[in-house]
Amino acid sequence: MPRLSAAIRHRIGFKLNGKPVSVEAEPRLLATDALRHGLGATGTHVGCEHGVCGACTILIDGAPARACLTLAVQLEGREVTTVEGLAPAPDRLSVLQAAFRRHHALQCGFCTAGILISLEAFLREQPKPSEQELREVVGGHLCRCTGYTPIIAAALEAAALLRRQPQVLAAESIDV
Amino acid sequence: MKAEVISWTGQSVERVEDAALLTGRGRFIDDLGTRPGTLHAAILRSPHAHADILSIETGAAAVLPGVVAIVTGRDLAKLTTPMVAGLKVAAENWPMAVERVRYVGEPIAIAVAQSRYLAEDALDAIEVAYRPLKAVVDPVTSMGEGAPVLHEKAGANLVSDRRFRYGEPEAAFAAARTVSVSIAYPRNTGSPMETFGVIADYDPHEDVYDILANFQGPFSIHTVLARALKVPGNRLRLRMPPESGGSFGVKQGVAPYAVLIGVAARIAGRPVKWIEDRLEHLGAAVAATNRVTTLKAAVSAEGRISALDWDQIEDCGAYPRAPEPATLYRMHGNMTGAYDIRHVAMRNRVVLTNKAPTGLVRGFGGPQVYFALERLMQRIAVELQLDPLDVIRRNLVPAGAFPYRTATGALYDSGNYQAAVEQAVAGRLAALEKRRDEARAAGKRYGIGFAAAVEPSVSNMGYITTVLTAEERRKAGPKNGAQATATVSIDPIGSVSVHVASTPQGQGHRTVLAQVVADIFGLPHREIRVVADLDTGKDAWSIASGNYSSRFAAAVAGAAHLAATRLRDKLALIAADQLKAEPKQIGFAAGAVFAKGNPGKTIPFGRIAALCHWSPALLPDGVDQTIRETAFWTPPQLGAPSESDEINSSLCHGFIFDMAGVEVDPASGRARIDRYVTMHDCGRVLHPGMVEGQIRGGFAQALGATFYEELAYAEDGAFLTGTFADYLLPTATETPDIEILHIETPSPFTPLGAKGVGEGNCMSTPVCLANAIADALGASEINLPLTPAKLAALAAGPEQAQPSTTRATVSVARPGDRSLRGEGEARVAAAPEAIWAMLLDVDTLASIIPGCHGVQKLSDTHFKADVTLGVGPVKGRYKAEIELSDLDEPRAATLTGSVSGALGTGGGSGRVTLTPDSAGGTVIGYAYEAAVGGKVAAIGGRLLDGAAKAIIGQFFAALARRAAPSKPGFFARVFGRRA
């Protein structure tokens, strides 16, 4: 990584949801602002800008990270996954997303992107999660609408479905 | 007229909103494109709770790169008028401080620049000179003698004092025993995950403001905004984005920012966008009112209540901003709760304090009222040695009494409270009592709590005028009703669209409206397209429009039902004409229109529906058009307050009965909710999944209000809870699962029989849990939030139960303040004379003060500095002033200083001594005493002491390097020790 100068913009290149992208960033530009306003990936939301609410959670090289506590320049050369990258196709939902819809696990949907990202990463590591483990994971996020219970129910169901038929269900279709 | 076939309504269909939200395609305000050249605003806010603004220097900020305009309160005052308030008080409601600041976080100036980053840079360069004034944060103190007056023109901080009397309360109290409770209900807020946002533009030729904001209504506020902006209503086009990330009432508070950003756009000559950050939101968006209540009951030996006496002191913060004091009056018709009590005395006072203005927050007045009322029910049981559930049962409104007129004027539409209570307790209470008895036998502190509450919904737009006297109301003209509106339209291929002015923030209105309208036309719900983003320049709306007072299911869905039914009835006339049948024979089902009893006579729905576009000549006599129908609906039951102040403050009255088992660990103060049962009657349920979502969400917010959340202020008015690390929201690990039960008594006053359900648990849950904890700990006085420290103190014994709630005396220690003391010494390899000269030199100081951005010399002994200091996790920019006195050159001097910044304030003094050592160097000794307030003070003494030591250490290390730069690796041992 070259030495950065505060006064100039640097061109940052990384992979966003599998596709190479590049964006100009001052060193102080937050990853959230680069993703949302630089690249138009507005699915990642900003709820607190101090790392507590979790709405901005993205995957950097597969690991969940708070995009609001990450500088855009830190994404250089990384693989970034945002909520836009979770569904298998533009007109479909992932197994987890479909479970969220079935269980009314979202209302306003503002915090949802971050929760989906954290669960996506966790379910990959732990395909047989207990309710308590899921509560711990979702406990890293603030949701003000749902009271969390439907989120946990959706995650439990998605985990069970993914264990049963991961390939078939990954292509579950969205019927809206 | 009722639809023949009802199939979708009442089902938990999947929401049409969800796919977009789950895939990152939501369209929240910050996700929408803006016009090229749109500028960005950042807002400078007051670090003082109360101060006169002496000057605002914007010159340096205005010339920074990318900065287009700096807007101050004076600029604002030239283009606008103060916002109209509900109270007739001589307090000017400016959305940005003009001459005086009255709360921490009050807007002072707006920087408008090419990016948000540049706008925030500009804020740092604005110099504001303040004359701090004494602040008052406690409402009782604020009413008292000698309290600083916030608005001098108003004369006092007590801005409304009304007494009410219904029935014969004096006689009832004279004839019965009195039981009372005193409550100090804290401030909290809904804290939606999406903050406020406004994008504004101004057309100087047409004098039109075009403002996009995630505002939630009520649109009575549109009139307030238009007047403030000095334009007629048709020149304020207020638009809402398709999605809004939660509100819980709070986004009513976007309104003042619509004025600020509108004016900023006018001054900048370009569109301006502003997105609030979380610190701004917690500190200055909208708080629920904190309230001091004394409630007395006249009660018989059996626990039957004959009269209530309410004394409520409502704290609306620094400005009585519309629609306040609505929080105090929203419940006016329901002040007897679920109980049949015919005599009521009431005194309502509204007080201003140096805290952020209050407004709509989920529950809106209900939490404050029910916390007192249901604590009182529990106290009656304890004091009269009765079963608490029996006390509730004995006082419930009788099942056969509906519609029931309360003493204070509400008309309870429907209910069967006894049935609801008995269904909830059946089997469950016995099990709960068993768990309690087992826990207690094992030495645990376990209690059971109950709460019964009437949940009002669909607010009467006239209830707020109850704050005025009957004579004042006569002068102002009557206000009443709750106009709801919906538009249903049919396009040239017969597809159906619905448009409403309900501004949802995640509740799923589009899904429910599709269900309701689909049932009328006999269509699949997925074929109905619903648009819920409102544009006041084009769409149907009225003052009651918006999403508040849980009015959607009862009022908006009802209006959509009405509009669709009108269109359907006209289509039936067309179909009857075409099918040669009687209109009353025409049915709509499965996408077809048919004549009942004659299967041969069927036409596709689209054919009949589109006819009016293509062949209007075929319309039968008496049918004007079937293209678009806009229904306005207001219930006749919502009249203006009567001469004797009776008011039907809401149209619908749902019922809730909650029951909880809670165990408290006396050592840690941790409360564990063992069981929670919540029984609801919200009339007809339109979508069970969404109703459950409202209940679970309301419960979680109530859980926060019970245990974690308080918008806290220090006694000097410093705001202490500006982050989610300070203002704690419950997470998945703290939120238990609950049992939800329903009975349905449909409302006879609403088109679909539905009532609101969105706010009930915010009213019932905090007090239900408090009652359980009171039972567990044998405590009598309980105030929220029940933090572990508070619970541990309550568990330790009744003698330390609670401080008195009359709070007339100011406590000795200022809870938000931290005193710091320290002393130490440092060795520097330069003579005292050289050190002395360095300490008085501006350039040297600028280079050695940690985080210093520049020092300004006001006189030989008076300096001003601009510094960035980090204390623990909180890093912020501060203005510092330092004065030197008691100069004893070159041996000693006293330094007195103060710092202030958005994150807090500090002040202190120290004596510095310079003593030559044997090696030609100097031993610098120092001793200091300082106090800090505000946000940084909330960090805690250990971190603060550590930070003070570190900063002083850095200062002397830099001084040592500067004094002897030629000696690399020079010995500059810096140490300090705590006194």
Image (cartoon, rainbow, N blue to C red):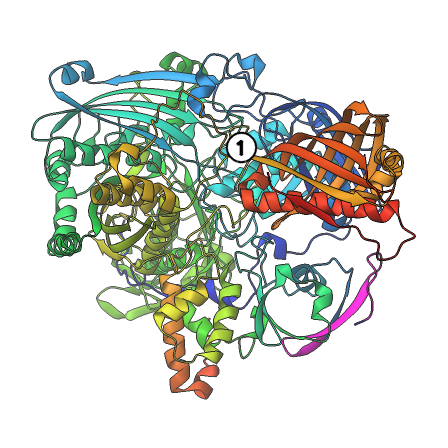
User: How far across and down, in percent of the image, does residue B693 sit?
Assistant: 36, 56
**Above or below B357: residue B722:** below
User: How far across and down, in percent of the image, does residue B233 sit?
Assistant: 59, 32
Q: Is residue B99 left or right of residue B614?
A: right
> Between residues B631 and B818, which one lies in front from this camera angle?
B818
**Above or below B80: residue B507:** below
Q: Is residue B494 visible?
A: no
Q: Is residue B395 left or right of residue A49?
A: left
Assess whether residue B836 is covered by the magenta stretch. no
Q: Image point 44% across, 58% down: which residue?
A: A107
Assess whether residue A15 is covered by the magenta stretch. yes
In which quadrant will I find the C terminus of chain B?
top right
Q: Which chain does the residue under circle 1 lie in?
A: B
Q: Quadrant of residue B175?
A: top left
Q: Quadrant of residue B795?
A: top left
Q: Image point 30% across, 36% down: which residue?
A: B782
User: How far across and down, in percent of the image, does residue B931 sit?
Assistant: 60, 32
> Between residues B212 and A24, which one lies in front from this camera angle?
A24
> Between residues B560 and B273, which one lies in front from this camera angle?
B273
User: How far across and down, in percent of the image, does residue B246 sit?
Assistant: 48, 51
**How many discs appear?**
1
Q: Residue furthest right?
A: B966
Span shown in magenta? A2-20
Amino acid carrying mark 1 in the image: Ala
> Pointer 1: residues within 10 angstroms few (<14), some, or many (20+)?
many
Q: Image point 52% across, 50% down: which residue?
A: B725
Disc 1 designates what residue?
B356
Q: Residue furthest front?
A: B918
Q: Is residue B676 visible?
A: yes
**Above or below B21: residue B456:** above
- Tag 1 secondary structure: loop
